[in-house]
Image (cartoon, rainbow, N blue to C red):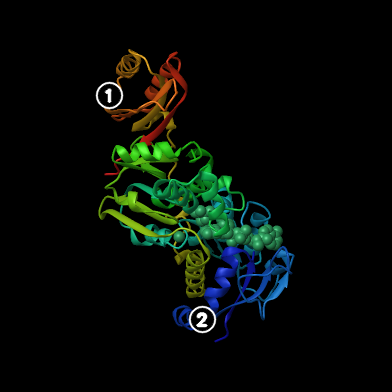
Amino acid sequence: MTAVKVGLLGLGTVGAGTINLLERNNDEIARRAGRGIEVVAAAARNLDRPRGCSTKGIRLTTDPFEVVNDPETEIIIELMGGYEPARELVIQALRNGKHVVTANKALIALHGNEIFGHARDNGVTVAFEAAVAGGIPIIKSIREGLAGNRIEWLAGIINGTANFILSEMYYEGRQFGDVLAEAQRLGYAEADPTFDVEGVDAAHKLTILASIAFGIPLQFDKVHVEGITHISREDVAYAEELGYRIKHLGICRQTDEGVELRVHPTLLPSRQLLSSVDGVMNAVMVMADAVGPTLYYGAGAGADATASAVVADLVDVVREFELDPVNRVPYLAFQSTALSDKPVLPVSNIVTAYYLRMEVADQPGVLADITRILGEAGISIEAILQKEPAPGAEHVPVILLTHPVRERQMDEAQERMEALEAVQGRITRIRQEQLQ
Ligand SMILES: NC(=O)C1=CN([C@@H]2O[C@H](COP(=O)(O)OP(=O)(O)OC[C@H]3O[C@@H](n4cnc5c(N)ncnc54)[C@H](O)[C@@H]3O)[C@@H](O)[C@H]2O)C=CC1
Ligand SMILES: N[C@@H](CC=O)C(=O)O
Ligand code: NA
């Protein structure tokens, strides 16, 4: 049988990785898919740039629409990134009756509902395993492997760049900016790295995970998003002293009232399995009613790991070529007519424990004022750490761990503490989770 002809949009880190992997494991892939898979056309911005792969036998163009409209291609792999023109290209490919494989979480999180509609109308597939947690087959695991369960919550380290930065700050005491530049050199970061460090990329991925876990539409605009830019090396060290690691997590949970969707730095007990996930590795813990907790671990970014997911999707698409579209696994795990309209809860409703770090005047009575404000807000304290002032400094760092409290109560207490004359500047506040 002839090889399946594929068109590729974007020849950067993941594009080159995909071409290399298809070439390297060509025979194994054909034995699994039932047919060979061959990239015949590719679009790149600059045709003269040296690439990390061979482009022998591939028709190259700077116009991605040429690839999408090429009658020879049966599957389009979108690896350009960004919202536009990726959205327009993917929709055009679907209208042309081509299946699409993409690693673009930004695209799926924001425009997935529209894109899946076009795919359904045209009887074709959109596959996006590489979009979440890189090489970890997390979409397939939740969508198919856990299909008998009611998923209660999931929590994951789903941005490799942020995890790499936090790990280097923890182990090597390195500066944020240096480590980010290294993540960019290694091909982990997004084209706009603020997406990694401000939590936007993790929010894109959490949007997708929550949809396939709970059967809700994609709702990126409802995710509460915080990045890691306000986390200092001191916070990392104090957390360690108290028996915790700081990890950037995406968390979603369904309760009777609605769904929590949040991305933020989190203190996790050092003994928690997720606390040992370091560097560019990702991990997602899923709590489901029948199976209990399951944990999925692997490389969350990088050329080879992401290509692994892209090629797995290609194989799935080829295996399903002959299948009646209604018999395919639904894009968001649940039938499109059976999505729930459960509301997304405001973050002020969430109940968590907190880590608080503040700089206070080194004088008597300050701690008493702080504990009084917390007490009046119904917030009990689990631990207090008071550090020595730096030589010549007028303020000392005080670190507090609280018991769980509703977020809006903490907002009020924080405002009152920051209003104290003895408290300098803003209080650093990080949520804490036990994940049990
Ligand atoms: N790098 C990684 O580890 C991972 C990346 N992803 C996703 O994979 C996608 C690709 O990421 P990378 O390969 O890292 O990005 P990249 O920046 O290395 O590659 C993108 C390529 O697409 C090309 N491109 C962009 N717009 C174009 C246009 N209009 N016409 C022609 N070519 C165009 C760029 O010139 C570039 O060579 C993104 O959606 C990203 O979020 C997903 C998982 C991991
Ligand atoms: N920039 C992303 C790439 C993978 O999705 C990350 O660092 O995780
Ligand atoms: Na994945």
**Residue 166 visible in the picture:** yes
The residue under label 1 is which amino acid type?
Ser
Q: Which mark is residue 26?
A: 2
In which quadrant will I find the C terminus?
A: top left
Q: Please state the horizontal and vertical placement of residue 7, each as a whole percent of the image.
A: 64, 71
Residue 239 drawn above or below residue 93: above
Residue placed at 33% from the left, 18% from the top?
367
Residue 150 percent across, percent down from the top left: 31, 50
**Nearest the eye: 114 or 287:** 287
Most distant residue in the bottom direction: 1
Inspect the image, locate mark 2, and give the three-letter code of the amino acid beneath it. Asn
Q: Which of 224 and 14 is in front in this view?
A: 14
Q: What kind of element bears circle 2?
A: helix
Question: What distance separates the C-alpha of mark 2 from that of mark 1?
Answer: 60 Å
Q: Which quarter of the picture shows residue 234?
A: top left
Q: Residue at x 37, y 39 (%)?
A: 237
Q: Residues within 10 Å of mark 2 (few under 14, many from 20)?
A: some
Residue occupying the point 39% across, 51% down: 213
- Nearer to me, 147 or 432: 432
Residue that badge 1 annotates: 380
The first of marks 2 and 1 along the sequence is 2
Relative to residue 338, is residue 196 drawn left or right? right
